[in-house]
Image: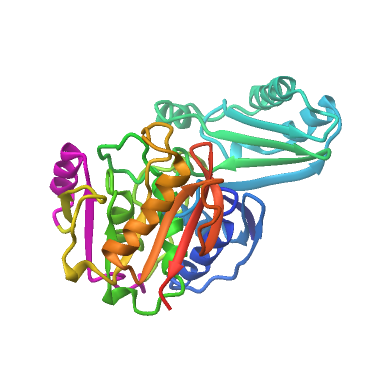
């Protein structure tokens, strides 16, 4: 059994755990595993091939790390010995690595010195254990692997990145709105919104401020595999994908996205003809009866990249009132930057979005 750490935004960890447990059932061989939430992610114990495959099946995390070692470490000579002792030739296809170093509440606190010591240790290891020239040639154009070093209260954790580009990069390119929502965050909020709704498949999903259509796109691909290049493909630990069955069903009966940006709407419609995109202003529009009493999700402007021409408290209160009056949703999920959620009732989930602390306000019609 190997130890993996699934990184998620703080506040969204339980959503990723739920997705993990749901999609673990896709594996045909029903492998053993254990998983628990910790701050900033989910710790998983499982075999290597299934742990690596999580990159392909999970859509809510940021990245997935393979834990290599955890040990007390209070000085640089000890750090050097620990890192040099690892059998890197069995893990890497390069003789160099990139580093991500964090250090808190530890005697070793200077991250530049920590990185230099670790880099020296790996260089000295490969000086005595060169990789075969055939391997170096095969992978010379591939990105260098990334090693994560974390020191907290003198405990060193060494992890190898299995993901590469963050997991919200799905392997496709779309036009972006001014303040785009990461696909992984959109996926988390969609799952949080519909987790208590039994008949979501009988409803239409509506985003009245859809921008580049992230919520709608993510819903359509909620249970699809992510088939792109991952960091583990350029490691010695690359293994064959386990066999899987997709046991998911359709989630919604239809999709509608509205936005003021004519160019984005045209681009969205071109890329996703199965979604209904229309140019429209939520505050001015009138919606047909067929779009009322459905499920609505909104990521409005926060007033940073896109300006709001009135007080933010008034704007967000007016936005909620407008959505409920015009669409009368059976379920509403809406992102609101704090503290402007105060005075608005509903179930609240807090997390950080592009450096802004926000609340996802959830309201279900009783």
All told, the count of numbered labels is 0
Q: Which quadrant, please, contains the N terminus?
A: bottom right
Q: Answer with left or right where residue 203 lies relative to residue 23.
A: left
Q: Answer with left or right where residue 271 lies relative to residue 331.
A: left
Rendering coords of residue 308 (x, y %): 38, 36
Q: Nearer the viewer, residue 342 or 117?
A: 342
Range drawn in magenta: 246-273
Rendering coords of residue 324 (x, y %): 34, 63
Quadrant assignment, res 193: bottom left
Q: Answer with left or right where residue 119 lies relative to residue 329.
A: right
Quadrant assignment, res 73: top right
Q: Answer with left or right where residue 111 lies relative to residue 33.
A: right
> Height in image: 24 above or below 168?
below
Residue 58 visible, this angle: no
> Height in image: 96 above or below 253?
above
Rendering coords of residue 352 (x, y %): 54, 44
Q: Nearer the viewer, residue 301 or 134?
A: 301
- The answer to whether residue 260 is magenta is yes
Rendering coords of residue 218 (x, y %): 33, 55
Quadrant assignment, res 123: top right
Residue 255 visible, this angle: yes
Q: How is the rendered protein coloured? A: rainbow
Q: Which of 345 and 219 is in front in this view?
A: 345
Q: Residue at x 61, y 35 (%)?
A: 147
Q: Which quadrant, please, contains the C terminus?
A: bottom left
- The answer to whether residue 42 is magenta is no
Q: Which residue is drawn at 55% across and 30% down?
A: 131
């Amino acid at each position: 059994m190997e130890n993996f750490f699934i990184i998620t935004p703080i506040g969204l960890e339980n959503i990723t755990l739920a997705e993990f447990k749901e999609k673990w059932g896709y594996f045909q061989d029903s492998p053993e595993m254990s998983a628990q939430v910790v701050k900033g992610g989910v710790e998983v114990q499982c075999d290597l091939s299934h742990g690596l495959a999580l990159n392909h099946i999970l859509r809510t995390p940021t990245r997935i790390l393979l834990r290599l070692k955890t040990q007390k470490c209070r000085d640089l000579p000890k750090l050097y010995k620990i890192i040099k002792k690892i059998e890197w030739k069995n893990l890497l296809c390069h003789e160099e690595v990139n580093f991500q170093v964090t250090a808190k509440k530890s005697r070793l606190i200077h991250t530049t010195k920590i990185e230099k010591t670790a880099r020296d240790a790996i260089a000295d290891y490969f000086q005595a254990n060169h990789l075969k020239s055939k391997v170096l040639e095969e992978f010379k154009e591939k990105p260098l692997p990334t090693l994560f070093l974390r020191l907290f209260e003198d405990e060193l954790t060494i992890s190898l990145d299995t993901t590469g580009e963050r997991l919200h990069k799905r392997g496709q390119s779309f036009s972006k709105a001014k303040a785009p929502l990461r696909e992984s965050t959109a996926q988390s909020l969609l799952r949080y919104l519909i987790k208590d709704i039994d008949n979501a498949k009988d409803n239409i999903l509506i985003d009245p401020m859809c921008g580049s259509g992230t919520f709608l796109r993510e819903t359509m691909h909620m249970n699809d595999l992510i088939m792109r290049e991952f960091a583990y493909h350029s490691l010695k630990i690359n293994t064959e994908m386990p066999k899987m069955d997709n046991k998911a069903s359709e989630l919604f009966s239809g999709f509608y996205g509205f936005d003021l940006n004519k160019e984005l709407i045209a681009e969205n419609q071109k890329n996703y003809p199965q979604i209904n995109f229309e140019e429209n202003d939520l505050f001015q529009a009138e919606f047909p009866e067929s779009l009322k009493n459905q499920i609505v999700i909104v990521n409005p402007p926060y007033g940073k990249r896109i300006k709001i021409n009135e007080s933010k408290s008034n704007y967000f209160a007016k936005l909620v009132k407008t959505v409920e009056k015009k669409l009368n949703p059976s379920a509403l999920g809406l992102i609101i930057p704090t503290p402007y959620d105060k005075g608005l009732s509903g179930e609240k989930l807090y997390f950080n979005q592009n450096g802004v602390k926000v609340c996802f306000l959830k309201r279900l019609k009783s």
